[in-house]
Image (cartoon, rainbow, N blue to C red):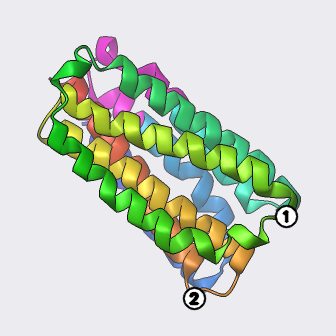
Amino acid sequence: MIAYIFLSAFFIVAGLNLFATKKENKKLNYITKPLLMPMLALFYVFGVPIATVNWLIVAGLIFGTMGDIFLMLEEKWFIYGMGAFLLNQILYTIAFFLSITNIAAFPIWGLFLLAPVLLILYFNMPKFMHKLGELKIPVYVYMIVILIMHISALLTLAEFNGLPFIFIYLGSLLYVFSDSFVAIEAFEKETPQAGLIAMATYILCQLYITLGAVFISLI
């Protein structure tokens, strides 16, 4: 029961945060954004048997909170936000890889599921890559890590099917989509509502990955 209280609170806070993002209400954004990932972490921890909790996912959500906070601050903190989200993705990657017991069971048709992320990169990268300046190397490293995270999520198809895989796969895909719009908002600054799109897809990606972890714990 308590898990659903935290999940309900998450949806309420998420709605308020999207409203704040759309209206550019910094005060409401500062109040709501740091609460999102802790609400998901508490939903997960209280929603499954404690012995089945994947603490790598919980730690990832904690670093997600840190990334959210850094990105709310001045532009000079942007690189620290990238670092926090980088650790978030590394922890997810390790969690996904460790969940696979027989990689040989991965179906070859699963490779076609890489197509959406390739299309996202193809259409969105040209919008900001030429404006990275000194951040070019950190952004390249970040992109490689998030792609590895997405691939590790895709490879869980060797272990899971149905909702556990669907949530993890869609979550990782939306993570790539969201971060591409974060970059567009930060460097290109000419795409309407890029911030709102980035935040909405970020909320969904973290929710889906958490739900995937919940379903795995309940198997």
Which stretch did the figure color magenta? 42-59
| Residue 61 drawn at (x, y percent) | 52, 37
Give me the residue at 70% from left, 52% from top: 139
Q: Is residue 29 left or right of residue 10?
A: right
Dividing the picture into quarters, in which one does residue 53 lie?
top left
Camera-side mark, 2 or 1: 1
In whole angstroms, how far apart are the C-alphas of marks 2 and 1?
23 Å
* The N terminus lies in quadrant: top left
Q: Is 33 situated left or right of 203 in this image?
A: right
Q: Which residue is mark 2?
A: 192
Q: Residue at x 27, y 25 (%)?
A: 48
> What secondary structure is found at the residue carrying circle 2?
loop
Residue 74 seen: no
The residue at which mark 1 appears reads as 133
| Along the viewing direction, whichever of 148 and 166 lies nearer the viewer | 148
Amino acid type of disc 1? Gly
- Image-quadrant location for residue 62: top right
